[in-house]
Every structure is written in structure tokens, then in C-alpha cells.
Image (tube, coloured by chain):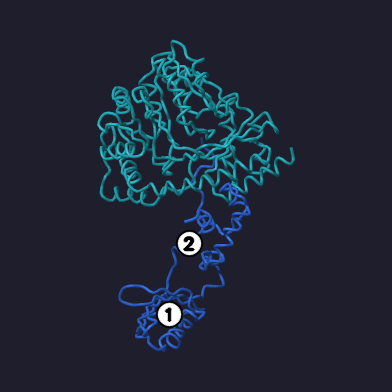
Amino acid sequence: MKREISRIVENMKPSGIRAFFDLVLGMKDIVSLGVGEPDFVTPWPIREAGISSLEQGFTSYTSNKGLYKLRLSISRYLKNTFCMEYCPDEEILITVGVSEAKDLVLRAILNPLDKVIIPSPSYVSYGPLTELAGGVPVFIDTSKNNFKLTAGMLKKHIDAKTKAVFLNYPSNPTGVSYTKKELNALKDVILRHKLLCITDEIYSDLSYDFEHTPLPTLSGMKERTIYLNGFSKGYAMTGWRVGYACGPKEVIAAMTKIHQYTIMCVSITSQMAACEALHSGKVAVEEMKREYMRRREIVVDGLNALGLKCHKPNGAFYAFPSIKKYSRNCLDFAQRLLKEEKVALVPGTAFGDQFTDYVRISYASSMDNIKEALYRIKIFLKRR
Amino acid sequence: MDEILEILEKDARTTPQEIAKMKRKKPEAVKKAIQKYEKEGVIVKYKAVINRDLIRDNNSEARALIEVNIVPQKDVGFDKIAERIYSFPEVTSCYLISGTYDLLVVVEGKNIHTVSNFVAEKLSCLENIRGTVTHFLLKKYKEDGVILKHREENKRIAISY
């Protein structure tokens, strides 16, 4: 049967990581720092809005683009928060999380063998989705520069086939974000080479050190950017699956074409809940953010004290420490840590083949769990 | 509200050293701030929130909310009579409230009889008390912002991107 599977899909890697994930999922009583979603439950008013929409009988399809009310709320939210202008009729599309939006945008813009630049380590789906859309991912290793892409690095990797650049800040897996100045430097290269930029800013609500600058707010960038965001991380709504894409109307129209045939529309319950999130969720987001910031200090400090060298993340809820002092094989390191001390984390190679010296630690876990995990890691490392 | 208070209100076991790390401050400065709050009475006490329903030999305990109507006294209003009420060790909380009655008093006792006796023999007999209405507590769902349930299982999958 294997012969019947498409070559692109056959070559996509589940690799050793999948087996490790299965190992974790099969074990009991572990302390996990390997979770890529908030440990908070969706704030009650948002859950309540979902329930009440069901009680009122909202169980139908919505417009392909998503509930107008939600698109309007998003448009207002972006305007009030970042001074970004997006028209709810033509420039916003509601998607099944940012995940679907990434797939749509790549399929909408890529012709066969177009290249897409991806700073790495990167979130796991950027490469495979690019390939599925017929494109060629070009990874730029940013580890030498504190996981930040610079204009120089970007310029070096651009050629005639380059169509687009992926940005993701604050980043999963590193937590690194870009300042306005750094973004402006990248902007100049993007505009000069007439590239498109796909910017995944799903963690923007969780920015700790400086104000988050959305890429489309830089002059000249709105026309070249597809801005992706959603409700999963800030509002702790991962399971609801609501994201959105904002961009030039031609791109949004092209994405909507694919979306209408594949997805039709996002679940109406989730869209109603998302409306409530924008309406009343801000206070809850701020409270969760403060808690993440406290955990960040404990985690970064704890890891560095253990010799797991770790830069300080600017946002999201991840740290990406180097394990070089103890191991050059992150998968082996993670497996041993799991078996010996029952602590789960994600090996760095999940985010790029060359990151064998790194692991991703998520601090979307209670303070008690974090302290317990750090203690167990300490015991584990003492034996090395 | 100072974040130090927010942190301690969430988990009173957090040490000054840990708070110092979280806030990137010196442990000494945090210690000093906490001492100041303690001295001023902002931080009144540190205690555990206990779900008594789960204590097996404790089933007989009874609690009641009592509405108390009182005749305010000259010069001191409600305060004097409130003091006489809250000084009883059986009273765990006491609030002056607006509405059809004046004081809301929470009383705890070994069982229904002890609480009833307290109301009948102590509370109702106090001077200036016009009347009481006693509501026995049947079940506690949430207290001080904490939902009192068996520890919730983890609903997230243990590892994900």
C-alpha cells in the first residue's frame, strides 16, 4: 500500500520524535514541560458564551469568511490595539486556528518550486506545509544570533525563486521576539526584493519585554504581509480552533476559495465564543500574562543555574536551553529524562534537524509543576 | 494591587526568594515589603483552604449563615453590637450589609444542635437584637475563589508542539 501514498507525504517526517511523543503519552504520573498550549482553561465568560449560543440554537454554517460580527470585532480590536486597518468584508478570513491559515496562504500564493524562507528553529508545520503546497522551504539557522533573523542573513538566502518569508514572533520554540527596529531592518530587504511575508503572531498577547509590533504596521508592509493571529494562546482557547488571516484582498479572496471547498467555515460555537473573547477577555489575558512572566523568571533562572544555558525569551511560554554541557543528542537526553525522572520536554530536533543540542521547555504549567520538574532535572543531571 | 500580594494571595507558600526571582528584585527588598504588609495588617494571616467535606471524621460539622436584625445604638451605630457578636469564637465571619437586615454572621459548630443552641441561647438574647433568620449550609461549592472539588484531572495531552 505504501506505493500508493503520495511522494511528498511519504517523505514528510514523523521521525524519531513521533515515537518519543507516543512514549510520553503512554506514561503515567509524569511532570510535563512539553505542552504547547496554556495550562489555563478558557475563561468562564467565553465558555459561557459558547454554551449559551448552543442553547439559543446557533448550530448552522456561517458565511465562508466567518461570522461578520467576529470579523468586525477583529477589525476593531486590531485598530484599537495596534492602529491596523483591515476591512471586515474583504481583508479578514476566519480560519480553523492559525494552522489552517498557514496552509491556505501557502497554497494561495505558491507556484511549483517557489521558495519560502523559514528562520529556524521553527514551528513544526512551516516546512511540511510549504512542501505540500509545492514550494521549497529554505531554512536559515538563527542559533548563532540568539535565534534572530537579521537583514544580512535574509539577503544571503534570497534568489530569483524566493517568493515569501515566514516570521513567527514571539516564537515557538524559542520565545524570541523582534523589536520594531529589528523588524524595520528586515522590512527593507523584504520590500526591496518584493517578497511576501507570512507573519504568525499567535503569541503577540504574550509579549513581556517590549511592545509587540505587528509587521503590517511598518510603512509599506501591509501590502506585502499576510498577518496571522488567533485566540488559542492568549485566551487559552486552543481546543476551540479559531484563528484569522488578514491581508491584501486578493490574497484573502484566494485563501477563501480554498477554505470554502475544504473547510466551508469554522464551527459557529467557536466563533461565538471568540466574539466574547474580544468583548470581555482582556482582563483574563492580562492576568495569565502576569503569571507566565513570573514563571519565565523561575524557569530561565533555574535552567541557567543547572548549566542548561538559556537565553531569556521575550514572549510566548517557551525556553529553548542548550543541553550541550551534558549531551549532544537531545532525543536520547529527553528519553532518559523521561524514563529516569518522569519529566517530559520536547527535543530540539522537532524544530529543525540541526538542533540536536537543544530542548524546548514549556512553562505553560503550574508553578508547583515547574518547581518539581526543575528539581527532578537537577537530580537527573547530577548523575551525568 | 502590588504583585507581591497577588502572588501570596494565590499561594502563600511562595518564599520571598522565589518572589524576588519572579519580580527580578532583591530578596531583602521583598522580605521588607512583606514585613511591612504584615505590620500594617494588609497581610492578616497565612492559612490553608481546607475542603472539610473530604475529611472523613468531620462529617458532623455544621455551618450556618445568620441574618441578624439589630437596633443601632446611639453614637456607635452597629459597630458595638457587631463586636459583641463577632467576639464569640463560634462566629467565623461577620459582615455589615445593606438590604433588609443588618449583619450577616457565619457560625460554625460541631453539629446542628450546637449551632442552634448558640443562636437560641447566645445570639438572640443579646440586647438590641430584633430578630434572626438562620440558614444552615448544605453544600459548599466554592470558597475564597477556590472551587472545592476533587483535584481536577489534567485534561491536556502531556506533550504537544
Q: CA distance from mark 2 to mark 1?
A: 30 Å
Identify the subunit bearing mark 2: B
Q: Residue B14, located in which quarter of the rendered image?
A: bottom right
**Residue A208, horizontal then vertical, whole percent:** 49, 40
Q: Residue furthest right?
A: A383
Mark 2 — residue? B148
Say if A98 sits above or below B128 in the image: above
Q: Residue at the spot x=62%, y=45% of the render?
A: A373
- Tag 2 and tag 1 share a subunit: yes
Kind of residue sitting beneath label 2: Leu
Disc 2 element: loop
Q: Earlier in the sequence, mark 2 or mark 1?
A: 1
Q: Is residue A241 left or right of residue B91?
A: left
Q: Residue at the spot x=43%, y=80% of the render?
A: B82
**Residue A360, horizontal then vertical, whole percent:** 57, 35
**Chain drawn in blue:** B
Say if B82 sits above or below A371 in the image: below
Identify the subunit bearing mark 1: B
Camera-nearest residue between B29 and A15: B29
Kind of residue sitting beneath label 1: Ala
Residue B82, disc: 1
Disc 1 element: helix
Q: Is residue A157 left or right of residue A263?
A: right
Q: Residue at the spot x=30%, y=48% of the render?
A: A54
Q: Residues within 10 Å of mark 2 (few under 14, many from 20)?
A: some
Q: Residues within 10 Å of mark 1 (few under 14, many from 20)?
A: many
Camera-nearest residue between A274 and B96: B96
Q: Is residue B82 left or right of residue A257?
A: right
**Chain drawn in cyan:** A
